[in-house]
């Protein structure tokens, strides 16, 4: 047998190809082939005790053992590479292998033997196993059953911290972080930071049936929390919750939860942190140690497996991370506003008494009706009862009232006449509250619908001749009286005209007839 181990050890010591060839009795061509293939497959010194010449030969030339059997050799590198592609399965690759075997007049291995040989090869020489898991396809997420803790600085009490775990099943790379609650905000935020840690997103997220993420999950119906669904759409992934009471649907994260409970949570049992930020710094250190721990039965670790065989398969992250938002429903009040956390936001008045959907983020309130965008407001903070109103949402009569300002009132009075201007200025000076004065002036302006500018100006002139403190009510009275006097005078004139109008009456004799006595 060729002295594979000696060849590689001498090369590692810097011995020339000629020296290695003379020392091992192998040709320089064979020595070069062994060195180049070992470099390509990442086999470097120093070697473990079990890595003898036979082990190295099987690693470098796995097809040799199959050639002796007279069967078609299996190209394990090709199979491992092809299994990483979407929709490619081991059964498809075995079918193609059978076709190639018959074309070469060789006997193919059965599917069972084919799968077993590949499984042995992948477990021994590859960091990831691709029979059941494809790179970049699935991310499994869950809360760890065990909890960590932080110390309250004031009371010295231990405060529970819940640990979120996310695992990529192909490379087994995991992410973990501690939060002070398991609510929707913590759940979504942990997902966002997990994607940032991995540097990409997967095609599918497999989660547990927590109320924060899944509203309803039966054999016939799946209803996701709207915020969770929106986050998944933002990262171009889909959420597929595990079946109820079926932990085998997410075995990788279940296993990682146990490992993380040991290597992170238990490892930090004697570490005292006084804030969630301090705790997460310690968790990140332990997480890096966990992901860089060597595999027990094969070369490499979780992080190297991810870098070599899964990182490239993740979907790129969007330009901006998902902005956490919360969905609620609200009923539009008669004043065309909705109430959200004791703050009031306007919507178009046509939707009064309608049910609307409200999307809340840290800085925006967005309102939808039947999935149709209605309006957006900047979110209000501070004292309760604040109001955000958009002018276009108001009915026309409300817009008129909203437009009332001292400047607008004076401009209108000038368009009527000098007496009206004096009345308006008097009203603005008389009332202590500007709002009350503008309400009175608004009532005066509405009189334009019933009276002419001349009539209003005349009434203002008359009221100014009687008092220095005119009121809108007195002007209304004068306008009514003037209107009544004008109507009476017109009626009298019409009556006089009727009484004075008369004509001559011709008798029948005028027309050739006889008058009757």
Image (cartoon, rainbow, N blue to C red):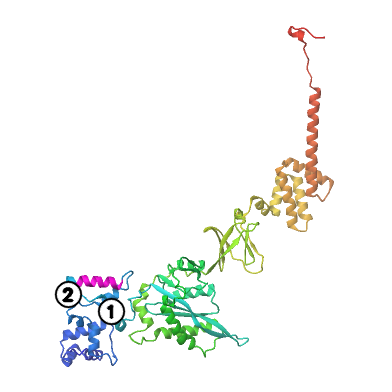
- Is the residue under label 1 in contact with that under label 2 (CB below 8 Å)? no
Report, in whole angstroms, how far the alpha carbon at label 2 lies from the one at label 1: 19 Å
Q: Is residue 76 something one can see in this rendering? A: no
Residue drawn at x 25%, y 84% as measured from the top left: 59
**Secondary element type, mark 1:** helix
Residue 415 in magenta? no
> For this view, does 8 lie left or right of residue 333?
left
**Any magenta on residue 97?**
yes
**Is 38 left, or right, of 315 in this rendering?**
left
Mark 2 is surrounded, within 10 Å at the Cα level, by few (under 14), some (14 to 19) or many (20 or more) other residues, namely some
Callout 2: SS: loop
* Residue 454 % position (x, y): 74, 40
**Residue shown at 42% from the left, 85% from the top:** 290
Q: Around disc 1, counting alpha carbons within 10 Å, would you say few (fewer than 14), some (14 to 19), or many (20 or more)? A: many
Residue 460 to residue 290: above or below: above
Asked where in the image residue 352 lies, by quadrant, the reply is bottom right
Quadrant location of the N terminus?
Answer: bottom left
Specify start and end residues of the magenta stretch as a single range.
89-101
**x and y percent of residue 151 in the render?**
57, 86
The extreme right residue here reads: 466
Q: Which residue is mark 1?
A: 118
Residue under label 2:
106
In this orientation, which residue lies closer to the viewer: 433 or 383? Answer: 383
């Amino acid at each position: 047998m060729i002295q594979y181990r000696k060849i590689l050890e001498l090369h590692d010591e810097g011995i020339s190809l000629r020296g290695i060839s003379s020392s091992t009795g192998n040709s320089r061509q064979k020595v070069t082939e062994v060195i180049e293939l070992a470099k390509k497959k990442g086999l470097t010194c120093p070697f473990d005790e079990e890595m003898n010449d036979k082990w190295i030969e099987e690693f470098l030339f796995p097809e040799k053992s199959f050639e002796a059997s007279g069967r078609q050799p299996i190209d394990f590198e090709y199979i491992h590479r092809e299994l990483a592609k979407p929709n490619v399965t081991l059964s498809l690759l075995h079918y193609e292998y059978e076709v190639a075997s018959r074309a070469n007049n060789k006997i193919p291995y059965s599917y069972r033997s084919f799968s077993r040989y590949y499984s042995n090869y992948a477990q021994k020489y590859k960091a990831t196993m691709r029979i059941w898991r494809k790179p970049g396809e699935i991310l499994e997420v869950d809360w760890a059953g065990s909890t960590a803790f932080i110390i309250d600085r004031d009371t010295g009490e231990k405060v529970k911290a819940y640990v979120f775990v996310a695992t990529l099943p192909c490379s087994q790379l995991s992410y973990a972080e501690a939060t002070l609650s398991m609510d929707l905000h913590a759940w979504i935020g942990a997902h966002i930071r997990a994607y940032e840690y991995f540097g990409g997103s997967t095609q599918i997220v497999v989660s547990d049936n927590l109320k924060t993420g899944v509203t309803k999950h039966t054999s016939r119906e799946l209803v996701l929390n709207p915020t969770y669904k929106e986050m998944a759409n933002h990262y171009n992934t889909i959420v597929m919750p595990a079946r109820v009471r079926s932990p085998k649907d997410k075995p990788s994260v279940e296993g990682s939860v146990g490992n993380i409970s040991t290597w992170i949570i238990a490892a930090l049992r004697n570490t005292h942190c006084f804030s969630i930020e301090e705790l997460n710094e310690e968790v990140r250190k332990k997480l890096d140690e966990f992901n860089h721990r060597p595999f027990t039965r094969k070369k490499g670790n979780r992080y190297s497996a991810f870098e070599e065989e899964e990182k490239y398969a993740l979907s790129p992250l969007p330009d901006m991370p998902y902005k956490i938002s919360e969905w609620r429903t609200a009923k539009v009040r008669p004043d065309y506003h909705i109430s959200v956390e004791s703050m009031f936001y306007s919507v178009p008045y046509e939707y009064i008494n309608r049910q609307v959907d409200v999307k809340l983020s840290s800085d925006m309130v967005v309102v939808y009706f039947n999935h149709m965008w209605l309006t957006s407001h900047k979110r209000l903070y501070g004292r309760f009862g604040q109001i955000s109103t958009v002018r276009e949402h108001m009915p026309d009569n409300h817009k008129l009232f909203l437009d009332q300002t001292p400047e607008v009132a004076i401009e209108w009075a000038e368009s009527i006449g000098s007496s009206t201007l004096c009345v308006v200025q008097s009203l603005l000076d008389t009332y202590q509250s500007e709002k009350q004065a503008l309400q009175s002036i608004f009532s005066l302006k509405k009189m334009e619908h019933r009276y002419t500018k001349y009539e209003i100006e005349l009434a203002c002139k008359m009221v100014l001749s009687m008092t220095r403190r005119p009121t809108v009510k007195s002007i209304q009275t004068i306008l009514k009286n003037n209107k009544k006097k004008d109507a009476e005078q017109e009626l009298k004139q019409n009556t006089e005209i009727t009484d004075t109008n008369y004509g001559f009456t011709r008798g029948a004799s005028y027309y050739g007839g006889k008058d009757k006595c």
